[in-house]
Image (tube, grey):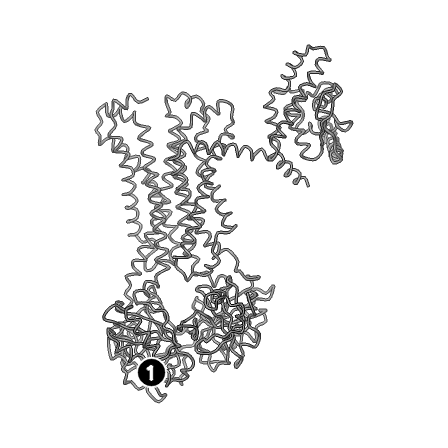
Amino acid sequence: MPDKNTALVQGTLDMLILKTLALEPMHAHGIGLRIEQISKGVFQVNPGSLFPAFKRLERAGWLDSEWRATENNRRAKYYVLTASGRKQLKSETRDWKTQSVAIARILEA
Amino acid sequence: MNVFRHLTGGLKELVRRDKTESELSEELNAYLQNAADAKVQAGATPEEALRSARLELGGMETVKHEVRAVGWEFAIEVFVQDARYGIRMLRKSPLFTAVAVTAIAIGIGANTAMFSLIDAILLRPLPYPEPQRLIVVGTQQRGRSEMDLMGTADFLAWRDHQQSFEQVAVLDRAGRSFALSGMGAPERIPGVGVSANFFSMFGVAPLKGRGFQPGEDRPGAPGVVVVSEQFWRDHLGSDPAVLNRTLTLDGKLRTIVGVMPAGFRFPSRRPVDVWAIRTLNPPAARPPYGLVGLGRLKPGVSVRKAAAELNDIAAQVAAQYPSSPDLVGVMMPMKEWMVSDVSTALLLLLGAIALVLLIAVVNVANLLLARATVRQREVAVRLALGASRKRVVRQLLTESSVLSLLGGVIGLLLAYLAVRAFLAFGPGQMPRLEEVGINSGVLLFTFVVCVGSGILFGLAPALETSRPSLSDPLKDTNRSSSSASAYRTHRALLVFEVALALIVMIGSGLLVRSFVRLSDVNPGIQTDHVITAAISLPNKYAGPPQITQFWQQFLEKVQTLPGVKAASITMSLPPNLLAITNPFTVEGQGYDRNHSLQLAEEMTVSPGYFRSLGIPLMKGRFFSPSDKVESDKDPMIVIVNQTMAKQYFGDKDPIGRRIQTGDPDPSFPWETIVGVVGDVKYSGLDSGPGPTLYVPYNENGWVMWAREMYLVVRSSGSAPGIVPAIRTQLASMDSTIPLAQIRTMDELLDESLVQQRFRTWLVSGFAALAMILSAIGIYALISYSVSQRTREIGVRLALGAQRSNVLGLVLREGLQVLAFGLLLGLVGALSATRIMRSLLYSTSATDALSFIATSFTLIAVALLACYIPARRATKVDPMVALRYE
C-alpha cells in the first residue's frame, strides 16, 4: 500500500517518466531513482507501477528501448524518448501547468 | 496509427509470448541487480542489499502479471486460459456436457436454419442492381384490398404516358408453360411471356448471348426466346453453340438468343425455363386482365408520386372504356410483392423456434445451477484465496460460452443439414428459395445467438455460485443457506420455461386444429379413382372447328378405353387450380358502376365433366353432347352452382333465368341457366362459398380458350394405371402434344395443403420439443429437491409420516411451479397467438379447445415428470437418510 504522501496523482507517472528521459536514455532503476531524488523523496516509485508504465508508453510509441551496458558493467534495458514522446511530453507539460495554476488559484481564493 | 501500433504490438506479444516473457524476466533481474548495486554503494552488505531490493520489487510474478495486464491481448489470454479450464471441467462430467450441448445444438441449429430462410427470403435485398427501385404494378377494384392483374389497355396506356419510370416491362401471368416438341417425347416446360425490355429493366446480364431488344415485341417480329441456365444444361447439353438454335414451342419455331445465369429466376415461385416475347396488340376491350406490370423507378422518384401518376392514367383508361368497372392502379415494391404472403408464416416459425431455444437455454441454466452447488466449494476456495467476484463470474461465463459455442458448432452442422432437407423435401413454391444458404450474415447471427445464449444461461448460475459466502460451503456440513437461493432461482426459471412451452404448444394446437378443419373441408367432388392431366393444343389447331374436332375425337377414344367410366375436359380443377374469374350481371338486377363487381369463378367444361368428378345435379340438367352452342346464332347456356342460385334467386327457380358475363354491357348476349349443381372448391379449400359458372367448352366465344385444358378421367380400377393407355391415344392423334402434370385428384388435394401441412408439422415438432424440454426441466428440479431433502424426508418418515404425505409434499412443489407457469403461459399465449390469426382456417386465435387441450397435455406430462422423482422420495429409508452426511 503506497503511503499517502508518496502516492502519485493518477496519470502523472507517465509524464514524470517522459520528463526524466528527456535528458538522456536511462534504465528502469535509474528512472525510479531519479524521480525519487529530484522530488526530494516525495515520490517513491513502486516497480509494480513502473514496469506496466513502460509497456504502456512503448505501446503508445513514446518510448523506445535497447539493451546496453550500465556504468557498473551490467546489462540493462535502456529507455529512449522518441520524437513523438517528446511532443507528448511538451503537450502534457503545458496542460499540467495550466491545470496546476488553475487549481492553485482555486485553493488560494 | 496509434490503433495500428496497439494492434500489432498486441499481436506480436501473442505470437512471441516466450520471447517477451524472458525479456521481461531479464529486465526485472537487471533491475534487482542495479538496485542492489546502489545499496552496496550506500554501504550495505551484498546479501542485505539484494534482500531489500527484492522486498522493494515486491514479488517478481506480481509485477510480471501487472505488466502483462497492460495490453488488450491480456483479455484474450485470460479468455483462452479460462476456456481451457472450462473444457477441462466439461470433460470431467461428460454426461452433463452431452446433455447441455445437445440441447443448445438443437436450439441453435433450428434457429440458424430458420434464420437462413428468413434472411434469404425476407431480409436480403433482391439480387438485382438497385432493387429498391423495382416496382410491381397492377389494378384494384375500388373497395378491395388485394392487387389484381392489369389488362393490355391499362398497360399500354401506362407504358406510353408514365414519366416516373426509367423502364417499364410486362409479364404475362396467363400462360405459364409451353409445349416443347421435336426433342424426344413432347413435354411441357415452365415458361413465361415477357415484353422486350424485361431483362434490361432488371439490369441482369445474360450468361450467354443477349436479352431481348427493343422492337422484338412488336407484332410480326420474329419469335425469339431466352432460356435458363438449367434448361441449357438439362435439355441442350450445355451446348456452347446454343445461340441461334431453335426450339419448337407450342408448335412454333423459336430462336434462342440468350441464356440467363442460374441466379436469375423471375417470377420466382417455380422454375422458369423459357422467357418468350409477349406481343401486345392494342386491344378492343379493357379485359381480360392477365398482365403484371413491372417498372424501374427513375432515381429519386417516390412510389407515392409514381402511384398518383398511375391513377390518373387508369382513370383515363376507364373513361375510354365506359362499360368497364372502375379500376384504380396500384403499385408496390417488388420484394413485398414477391414475399408478403409467406412472411407471416416464416416469422411465426422463427418466433416458435426462438421460444424453443429459450426453453433449452433455461434448461441448461438449470443444469448449471444444479452443478453450481457441486462446484460451490471450488469457487469458495478461489474467493478465499483472493479472486474477485468479477473474476470468478468471468471464469464461469467463459465456461458457459464454451458450452454454447460447442453447441453452436454442432448446431451449425444441423442447420446445414436442415436447410438442405428443407430445399429437397420442404414445400416448393416459395419465393427466392434459390437464394437460401448459410452465408456470412447467417454465421454472424449464429455467433451472436451462441454468445447471447451462453451468457443468458450462464449468468444466473454464475452469480449464484459466486455469491460471497465464504465459510458455509467450505464447511460442507450444512448447504441450506446458499442452496436455498439457488433453488429459488431454479424454480423461477422453471416457471418461465413452462410458460414458454405452453405458448409454443398452444400455437401448434391452433395450427393443428385449423389444419384438421381444412382437411375435413368437403371439396364438393368424389375424389377417388380420378386422374387428371394438362393438355394444350399448339397453334396449328387454329380455329373452333379444329379444336372442337380434336377434343371430340380424343374424348371418344379415351371414353372407350377399358376401365374408364367417364372422361371429360375442363379449364379449371378443384381444389385450387382456378383459371379465371369473370364479372356477371343477372337479368333484372342492373349493375351500379360505383360498386365493385360481383365476380364468379367461370370455366368451360365438356358435358361429361360433372359425372367424372361426381358433382351432384340439384336442379335442371347437365350439358349434353347434343347441345347446339357452336354458332353465334345458338342460344348460350350456363350451369350455376348452388350458392349462386341461392344468393341471386333465393327461393325462386333459377332454371330458365338469364345472366350476362364479362364487363357489364347491355349489348352482350344473354346466357340461359339450364342447371344447378353442387358447390365445388376451386379457389383453395380455405376459400369461402361463392358463385361458380360452367359453360360448354365449345360454345361460341369460349372455344378459343379450350386450347389449354385439363383432362379428367374416372376409372373403375387404379387411376394411375390407365395413364399409359391415355398417352398412347394422345400420341396417335398428335405426337407433338405432351400429357403434362399428371396427378390423381387425391394428390391435387394434398398438394393444395402442402404449405399448411408443412408449417403445422414443423410447429408441432417445435411444440413437442418444447414440451419434452420442459418436462426434463421439471424432472430435474424435483429430483434435485428430493436429493436435497432426503434427510428431512427421513425425519418425517421416522416421526410417522405416511408415504402418501411425503408424495404429496414433493408433488406440491412441482404443482406450484406448474400452476404459475401455466398461468403465465396462458396470458402470454393470449397475446402471442393473435399474430397467427391470418394463418388459421375457421379457428379463432383464442380457440378455447386448443388452449384447454394443450394445457391439459402439458399438465399430464409435467405431473409424470414430477411423479417419477417424487416416488423415489417415498422409497427413502429413514435409517439410511438419517445417517446421510
Position of residue B548 relative to residue A31, above or below, is: below
In the rendered image, residue A93, in percent from the top left (x then y), is placed at: 75, 31
Q: Is residue A72 left or right of residue B253?
A: right
Chain letter, disc 1 residue:
B
Position of residue B463 relative to residue B746, above or below, is: above
Label 1 sits on a secondary structure element that is strand
Q: Is residue B711 left or right of residue B407?
A: left
Give the residue displayed 44% in from the left and 42% down from the top: B407
Q: Is residue B209 left or right of residue B641?
A: right
Name the residue nearer the viewer: B288 or B837: B288
In the rendered image, residue B863, in percent from the top left (x then y), is placed at: 28, 40
Name the residue nearer the viewer: A49 or B136: A49
Q: Amino acid at mark 1?
A: Glu
Toward which corner of the image does residue B361 lie, by quadrant? top left
Q: Is residue B549 visible?
A: yes
Toward which corner of the image does residue B653 lie, by quadrant? bottom left
Position of residue B416 relative to residue B874, above or below, is: below
In the rendered image, residue B413, in percent from the top left (x then y), is placed at: 44, 47
Quick one: which residue is furthest to the bottom in this view? B633
In the rendered image, residue B267, in percent from the top left (x then y), is placed at: 47, 66
- Quarter of the picture containing the C terminus of chain B is top left
**How many numbered badges does the structure rendering display?**
1
Give the residue displayed 59% in from the left and 71% down from the top: B163
Please tell me how crowded label 1 is: few (under 14), some (14-19), or many (20+) other residues with Cα within 10 Å.
many
Quick one: which residue is furthest to the right in this view? A23
Please name the residue that numbered disc 1 is placed on.
B671
